[in-house]
Amino acid sequence: MDRLPWTRFHWLVVVGLGVSWILDGLEIQIVSLISPILGKPGTLHLTPGQIGFLGSGYLIGEVVGALFFGRLTDMLGRKKLFIVTLAIYLVGSGLGGLAWDYWSLLFFRFIAGTGIGGEYTAINSAIDELIPSKYRGRIDIAVNGTYWGGAAIGSAMGLYLFNTGNVPLNWGWRIGFFIGPVLGLIIIFLRRTIPESPRWLMTHGRNDEAEQTVDDIEARVKHGHRELEPVDESKALEVTEHPRLGFVTLTRVFFGEYPRRSIYGFTMMVTQAFLYNAIFFSYGLVLTVFYKVPSASLPYYFFPFAIGNLVGPLLLGHLFDTIGRRKMILATYGVSGVLLIISAWMFNAGMLSATTQTVFWCVIFFFASAGASSAYLTVSEIFPLELRGQAISYFFALSQGAGGVVAPWLFGHLIGGANNKHVHTGPLTIGYLIGAAIMIIGGLVAWFIGVDSERKSLEDIANPLSVSKRPEGGLSPAGATA
């Protein structure tokens, strides 16, 4: 798989699987724009507390979905799960448009969240195992970055749907919940043509199916009149089916056999989760409270913010394959942290306007977005194949609990001290400095204990647990724990 040139098959994988992040970004942005509408008479007339907990319900669903479906991804296969999880998202999101009260909408948001959470594990696993090692870093980072393309689309659609001059108040928010499912229905048929991961088949005793799948993929390449190099014998592996691991055993494997990699993966995930949730969930409040931007004008400021997040991974992604993972994580995390310190100082000094603040965010997250996307790549490639789906879900859940949930709460309180008569920038400045320090620490952790996994086969990065024999000089199971 790693020696294959780039072909139409790989584009099929990227388009068919990568749409998940577009849907997630679209979903989050549409709901953020719907939230104020749901509190008005003529809709569900929710309280501010109920509106706020809708976001929490979706996040809780993501964590539950990641943990539950992450285990099933390693047990039942990548293909079954990336179809099932997308279907669950489609149903949950679509039903949200039919909600009749707060509790029904909260339940449907939770269901949609479980589907997206499961998507994270199944999709990252499949992409890493089907994309050649030469391109794995840039593709995974670019695909994760497309979340912001979906957010930009959601913001554009919201400008039309939530304008009562175009669509009646009680219809616009309901239609908004159907946008993601309509796009997803198109993709779910495309996904059916994507094969199961040969690596997963091999480690589950289905060697004949694995060989047939690889033969079919190679036949597509040869059909395009492209020659293939013979497989180097040093890549040969003899595997046996590996027993399934319970949650307690899984924790012992991660932190007992792979302590440095577990600390590395957790740090990457929690640092980016803290920064993103802190800024993303508070940027609207910052603009309205400190810069007096009208709420109706917020989408116009969001567009450049989303574009900066989208362009960063697309332009910088290939450097993670050429310059290397550790250097680029240090650079992207470090530069975004330093720029955040500068912007925090200028913010506290009253030197910024709504426009210049947004420009700073665009530049900061141009770098931070590439680094954040590499966090998912890092966790999915540095652990053995049999644990890949569970590793993504495990560290995603830990990072959301430790950083993702805390950050919005903390920044909300720091902003909450401000009022329209006398605005205090000091508390929020401290919050920005905390976020900057966390990102810089994340970059340093990657530099000192990170893994040089660029352009390497997944089996050379982490020996599969099911390997019973490997050629002389190959990576031993003990060597894989570094």
Image (spheres, rainbow, N blue to C red):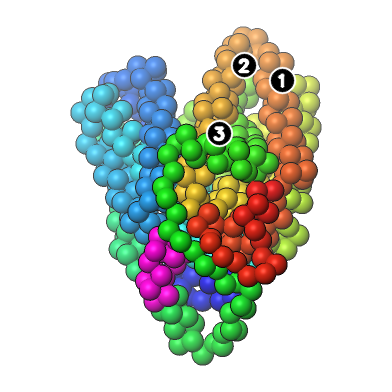
Real-space Cα separation, disc 1 to disc 3, in angstroms: 22 Å
Q: Are marks 3 and 2 in contact (CB under 8 Å)?
A: no
Q: Position of residue 87 (x, y in %)?
A: 29, 50
Is 363 rendered above or below residue 101? below
User: Is 184 above or below relative to 8?
Assistant: above
Label of residue 430 in the image: 1
Q: List x then y, in percent, for residue 256.
A: 60, 38
**In the rendered image, which quarter is residue 449 located in?**
top right
Identity of the amino acid at label 1? Ile
Magenta stretch encompasses residue 199: yes
Q: Residues within 10 Å of mark 3 (few under 14, many from 20)?
A: many
Magenta segment? 195-213
Q: Amino acid at mark 3?
A: Ser
Residue 417 picture location, percent across and down: 60, 11
Residue 184: quadrant of the picture: bottom left
Q: Nearer the viewer, residue 238 or 6?
A: 238
Residue 399's mark?
A: 3
Q: Is residue 181 left or right of residue 133?
A: left
